[in-house]
Amino acid sequence: MRADRRLFFAAAVLVAAAVWLPYWGFVMSAPQYPDESLVLNISREGITGDVQEVETLQKFIGVRFPEELVELEWLVPAMLALAVVLAIGGAAGASLAGRIIRWAGVGLFIALLVLCALTVQRNLYAVGHDRDPDAPISSMKDFTPRLIGPTKVGNFTVWSFPHIGGFALVVALSLATVGSLPSARP
């Protein structure tokens, strides 16, 4: 089996595996809690981790904790469909049709990741701007946590980062892209 096809099959396996892994994570720390950080993870099940503690703290600054993430309803089928497209790209031969299928898979993959990043950023914006005006601490300005990296929110530093499922997707995209390049063919 040619190297480009193996790369596509590996990408398909990584995408399928990523469905069951956490996609995104948040770690919140503050000086008043020196030995403790609050952790939230986003996965196909929704938001998990220190949800109750974060909800309690967010009420003070008027943040409305997301009850559900409706985008997770379409994300899992989209990821599984992408895995199928990548597997088809791995099975496709060296013909023009095979190359088109592989590049279409890469294009769909990029579109999915961009859509996911835009969705996460929209949700992060809403968390910091769609706040309760009657919150006990009303002096805090609106904020938007970064998609990746630290954001200062009051006394807390909130770190946002791709979790293991997110990294699996990036690796899978890299494999599929390399598998689509002419230089990947022996």
Image (cartoon, rainbow, N blue to C red):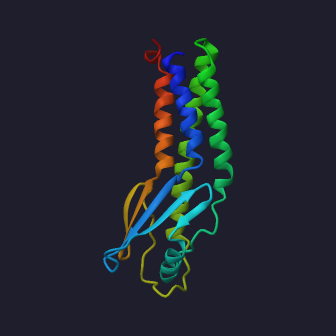
* 17 vs 62, nearest the viewer: 17
Q: Position of residue 87 (x, y in %)?
A: 62, 28
Q: Residue at x 64, y 54 (%)?
A: 72
The reply, left or right, for residue 141 in relation to residue 105 is: left
Q: Residue at x 45, y 85 (%)?
A: 137
* 173 vs 152, nearest the viewer: 173
* 129 vs 60, nearest the viewer: 60
Q: Is residue 172 above or below residue 121?
A: above
> In what quadrant of the picture does the C terminus appear?
top left
Q: Residue at x 65, y 43 (%)?
A: 78
> In what quadrant of the picture does the N terminus appear?
top right
Q: Position of residue 110 (x, y in %)?
A: 54, 37
Q: Is residue 20 above or below residue 180?
A: below
| Residue at the outermost bottom position | 136
Count the numbered circles shown.
0
The reply, left or right, for residue 64 in relation to residue 27 is: right
Q: Residue at x 51, y 29 (%)?
A: 176
The reply, left or right, for residue 5 in relation to residue 67 is: left
The reply, left or right, for residue 14 in relation to residue 67 is: left
Q: Position of residue 37 (x, y in %)?
A: 39, 70
Q: Position of residue 160 (x, y in %)?
A: 43, 59
